[in-house]
Image: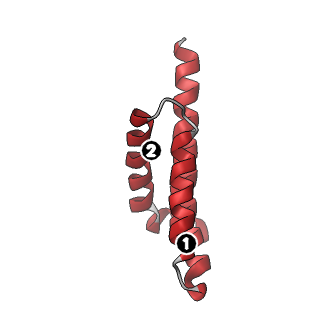
């Protein structure tokens, strides 16, 4: 059940993460910078959330954003390795 809710509520965050990761990959030369920057911004945003909403924010906001960025960069890395 939690997985389906995660996919339902996380779609906008996942789309935003893909766009942000793409833009950060265009600006930086290293693939590991984008997930680190996105993770840093997400953690800073989590600090300003009330404690009662913390677990909701972690599952539905933080995890989709960071995991999508990491997976996208892994796909880009594998694609670049195969292309060479």
Q: Which colour scheme is used?
A: secondary structure
Q: Name the residue under label 2.
A: 21
The answer to whether the residues at label 1 and label 2 have Cβ atoms under 8 Å apart is no
Which quarter shows the N terminus? bottom right
Q: Position of residue 16 (x, y in %)?
A: 39, 54
Work out whether 36 lies above or below 27: below
Location of residue 47 in the rendering, given as x and y in whole percent from the top left corner: 57, 74
Q: Which of marks 1 and 2 is nearer the N terminus?
A: 2
* Residue identified by numbered label 1: 46
The residue sitting at the bottom extreme is 52
User: If the image is split into quadrants, where does the C terminus sit?
Assistant: top right
Q: Can residue 4 be seen in this view?
A: no
Which of 14/37 is in front? Answer: 37
* Residue at point 44%, 36% (across, down): 25
User: Residue at image x 43%, y 60%?
Assistant: 13
- CA gap between label 1 and label 2 equals 19 Å
User: Which residue is found at the position 57% from the left and 17% from the top?
Assistant: 82
């Amino acid at each position: 059940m939690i997985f389906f809710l995660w996919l339902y509520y996380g779609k906008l965050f996942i789309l935003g993460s893909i766009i942000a990761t793409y833009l950060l990959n265009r600006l930086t030369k290293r693939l590991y910078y984008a997930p680190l920057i996105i993770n840093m911004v997400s953690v800073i945003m989590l600090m300003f959330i009330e404690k009662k909403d913390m677990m909701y924010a972690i599952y539905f906001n933080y995890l989709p954003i960071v995991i999508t960025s990491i997976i996208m960069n892994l796909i880009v890395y594998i694609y670049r390795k195969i292309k060479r």
